[in-house]
Amino acid sequence: MSNSPQDSESTGVIVTASPLARSEEVAWLLGLLLSCALFTLFLYDRHGSLVPGDHGRDLHAYELGRLGRTPYRDYQWKYGPLMPYVFGGAWRVTGRGLDTLRAAYLALLTASALVLYFVARRLLPAPLAFLASIASFAHGQPFHTFNHVGGTLAGSVATLFLLRWLEDPRRPRRRLALACACAAQVVFALVKLNMAGAVSLAHCFFLLRVGWRERDREANPAAALAQALRAPVAYGLSWLVATLCAYLPFVAGVSRSHLLQCFPWGTRQLVEHGSPWDIAFRFPEELWAHAFGTSLLPWDLVFSRDCLCPFLLVLGVSGGLVLSARYVLGSANAAGAAFLLLTLQAAFAAHEFLQLSTHYSLFYFVAPSVNPLVLALGHKLVARCRELRRGGGDAKTGAGRLAAANRAATSVLCAALGAGLLVAHAVRVPVDAERWLDGPGIRAYCGPTDTLAVIEEVARRVRGATRPDEPIVAFPFDPLYYYLTGRENGIYPEEVFEESDLSLEDEEECIRAMEARGVRCVLLSNAALWEDQRGLGAFGKTYAFRLAAYLDERYRLVWPPPPAYFPRPPNEVSLHRVLIWWRQDEEVPAALK
């Protein structure tokens, strides 16, 4: 009996047929867990960068989640309401800190890799399924944003249940699998609503195509159409109603103005990025810039997601379309149907990247779709091995070649893993001591050093000048200082940019809040001068006129003393500078002199 995976022609799904094959399956799963653990060991404290805006928003939201504050109602939050409670709950147990946050993130990322392994295993032999899942795990490293990981896990679980629905002909089991997939997508929506909606729409197209294939061809056209529509309509309506019910407790009673700040779709915040025609013409330009505008050294090819992700998107979707074409156009094949599912997910999940052209918009493409490019190449390799097994010589020789190919792939993967760990160890040591950021609840190896020095000094001065229960305000978008100082945000919005589209009433509301709460300290970073970047504007020049006038009327610049080095245009990671303003009718503390 061969110990290699055997393929079921009726389902197109790879199944194990012997105790030895099952033991190899367990060995690959254990290898996947070990690989994730080793990657974690070498990359655990490498944060890459710490952006006062995006990263600060996440840390501040998790702290508010730890304190039991409600997203949308108590603070501005542009993602689903789930992850502040997940990471904030972890902080409730261990105390706040970046170590706990990274550990929880890696646990969810590892769980996602395991689910993706079982998804890929339905189409590929174990070595290639291992490669697809570990590639998705590695794509989540180093840390860039923490929120997406809950969505990748939920989306992967939904994919697994939809494939189970495709495989099982028993009606009760199919209904259960479809209900579980829908529930996973509701969880996905609680992480990122627009991405979950796009992927759920892709699922409905997939269910419709499968239902149309499985319809009773002898029935009248109306009955056949109703039969084909049953699953996608039930799935789509169930997801929509359940998602609305899940969001209702969070949005009930929240003003329209605050809802628009949290859910900006359809407002100027998205319109500013261009019309569909602009996006269509800009996409090839972005692909070229990402691919050839960066160094093409081997190290960059491996680790530069800006370089690889656009090509993974295009090639992955293209490969998936080719492999699913037979299912769409001609003969039924379960493997083709599975590729159709993955390709639809990849195509629909790419809408945010097509609009914003940022690599982190592809987190939801890589993980829920298990990287269709890897799967496409793997499927072709498996098909070639089957040809060797079935033709051109006796079957025994072909089976031996297939087993040899599996062993060779295993050896190559193990060697690559070992080499990768050696490289990671070489990169890890030595480290530049000046690039360690130490502060309350945070210790991370970041960069560059000039930004870290500014962050540390501003946080230290604000802590020394204000009381622990005193609110501050950081314009236009620097919530990292709320987290590092332990001070609350004195107004509702976390970000105040031109694209935030704040009305005059919103600005007056911010002023009333600052007056009522006695805000003495205001931070203004050079991000306020991004007037040359689309949609961001310049504070007091293209937006926030009333807030800028109020700042000039009631506050005075106290640090750094003039002439202050305030470079423009700044960068999200480097050249970060901050001006500290203090209320005019209050004595300036020694910490700010």
Image (cartoon, rainbow, N blue to C red):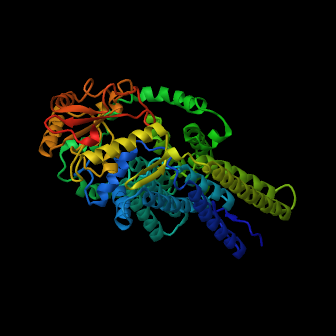
- Taking the image as shown, residue 300 lies to the left or right of residue 440, namely right
Against 171, residue 575 (above or below) is above
In front of the other: 485 or 531: 485
Q: How many marks?
A: 0
In front of the other: 350 or 533: 533
In front of the other: 309 or 36: 36
Residue name at image x 55 percent, y 29 percent: 289
In the image, residue 285 lies at what x, y percent? 53, 27
In the image, residue 183 lies at what x, y percent? 39, 62
> Furthest residue to the bottom?
19
In the image, residue 566 lies at what x, y percent? 37, 28
Residue name at image x 34 percent, y 46 percent: 460
- Taking the image as shown, residue 532 lies to the left or right of residue 31, namely left
Against 99, residue 455 (above or below) is above
Q: Quadrant of residue 515?
A: top left
Q: Quadrant of the N terminus?
A: bottom right
In the image, residue 287 lies at what x, y percent? 55, 32
Residue 76 makes an appearance in the image: no
Residue 186 makes an appearance in the image: yes
> Furthest residue to the right?
393
Q: Quadrant of the C terminus?
A: top left
Against 221, residue 3 (above or below) is below
- Taking the image as shown, residue 52 lies to the left or right of residue 510, namely right
